[in-house]
Image: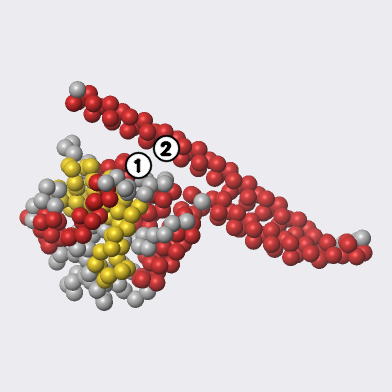
């Protein structure tokens, strides 16, 4: 399979009104890049329009943007990847700003930040609030300063394509990508872009509450998986606090009367302490396991780079 220098990948589901313009815009900005549309069971002829516009069209039969992104990582080979929605909300002229930190080796992924400049109707009601809430949770968990982890306009390296596991199915894919990269200690940069509203004849596929719920559930799952000591430790602290409050009464009785009258409270408090210790133990064990798996992943990555450089040297030798 031939490896492109830059691959502009466009997830597409019923984007007939805008797909041709998106393809032409990126052709103008990146004439040497390969434009690839990944059609996700469109019924409005988006794939035919993309082919007529000169794009290569791949198909992903499993419905959901997460499956499309997994298909991008699996089926496309390039040095640099650009991922952009096919709804013409992300201007192509910003792509050079997204790619430059990758060329300079200052970032592994660059994200187009939408919240500084956008059309009046670009965001639905509650979307900005939901975005900031999700962003705040991610920054709290990973101690970062990101501002738009849910943006669909991204550029990244072939290393990310090779190492990033994709589990999400739907529109929570951007959140998962961000958290997976932060967990694996890759560097994410953000650049400001102007986010445009969708054309009137191009309806959005997002549902504010359904997709917001999925994103929050994804954060919770990834928190349990990748920050288990934070998750279980927080619950354990709450349990210990409850045990302290409940245990205060039998302890006071014993101090005053050398006898415990509130036996049920004493039993409950003791049980809560045991539960708290179990939660802390679970969090510690999973954290240590995750750390060892991260070490193994790092070693495999280093070996992969070593063999890649060896193969390149043999080809040029």
Dot 2: what SS? Answer: helix
The quarter in which the C terminus is drawn is: top left
Q: Which x, y percent locates residue 146?
A: 39, 60
Side (left or right) of 75 relative to 218: left
Disc 2: CA contacts within 10 A as few (<14), some (14-19) or many (>=20): some
Residue 223 pos. (x, y %): 49, 54
**Which of the marked residues, 2 or 1, is nearer the chain's N terminus?**
1
How many neighbours does mark 1 have within 10 angstroms: few (below 14), some (14-19), or many (20 or more)? some
| Rendered residue at 67%/50% (across/down) | 277
When the figure is inspected, residue 145 is found, relative to residue 279, above or below; the finding is below
Q: Foreground residue, 276 or 310?
A: 310
Q: Residue at x 69, y 58 (%)?
A: 240
Which of the two residues, 152 or 50, is positioned nearer the viewer here?
152
Query: Looking at the rendered structure, which numbered label has been put on residue 243?
Result: none
Residue that badge 2 annotates:
297
Q: Residue at x 38, y 57 (%)?
A: 175
Query: Are dots 2 and 1 in contact, CB under 8 Å?
Result: yes
Q: Relative to 142, is 62 on the left or the right?
A: left
Q: How many marks?
A: 2
Query: Which residue is disc 1 drawn over?
Result: 163
């Amino acid at each position: 399979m031939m490896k492109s220098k830059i691959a502009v990948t466009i997830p597409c589901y019923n984007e007939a009104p805008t797909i041709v313009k998106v393809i032409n815009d990126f052709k103008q900005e990146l004439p040497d890049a390969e434009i690839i549309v990944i059609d996700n069971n469109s019924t409005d002829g988006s794939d035919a329009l993309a082919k007529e516009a000169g794009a290569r069209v791949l198909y992903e039969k499993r419905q959901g943007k997460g499956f499309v992104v997994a298909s991008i990582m699996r089926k496309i080979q390039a040095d640099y990847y650009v991922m952009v929605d096919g709804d013409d909300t992300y201007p192509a002229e910003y792509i050079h700003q997204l790619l430059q930190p990758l060329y300079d080796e200052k970032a592994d992924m660059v994200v187009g930040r939408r919240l500084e400049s956008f059309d009046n109707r670009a965001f639905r009601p509650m979307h900005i609030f939901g975005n900031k809430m999700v962003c705040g949770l991610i920054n709290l968990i990973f101690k970062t300063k990101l501002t738009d982890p849910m943006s669909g306009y991204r550029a990244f390296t072939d290393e990310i394509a090779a190492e990033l596991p994709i589990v999400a199915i739907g529109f929570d894919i951007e959140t998962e990508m961000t958290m997976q990269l932060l967990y694996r200690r890759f560097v994410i940069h953000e650049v400001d872009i102007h986010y445009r509203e969708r054309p009137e004849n191009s309806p959005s596929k997002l549902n504010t509450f359904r997709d917001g719920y999925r994103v929050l559930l994804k954060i919770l799952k990834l928190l349990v998986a990748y920050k288990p000591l934070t998750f279980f430790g927080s619950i354990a602290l709450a349990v210990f606090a409850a045990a302290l409050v409940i245990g205060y009464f039998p302890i006071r009785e014993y101090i005053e009367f050398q006898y415990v009258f509130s036996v049920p409270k004493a039993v409950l408090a003791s049980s809560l302490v045991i539960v708290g210790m179990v939660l802390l133990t679970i969090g510690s064990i999973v954290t240590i396991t995750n750390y060892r798996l991260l070490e193994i992943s790092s070693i495999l990555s280093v070996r992969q780079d070593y063999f890649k450089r060896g193969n390149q040297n043999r080809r040029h030798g």
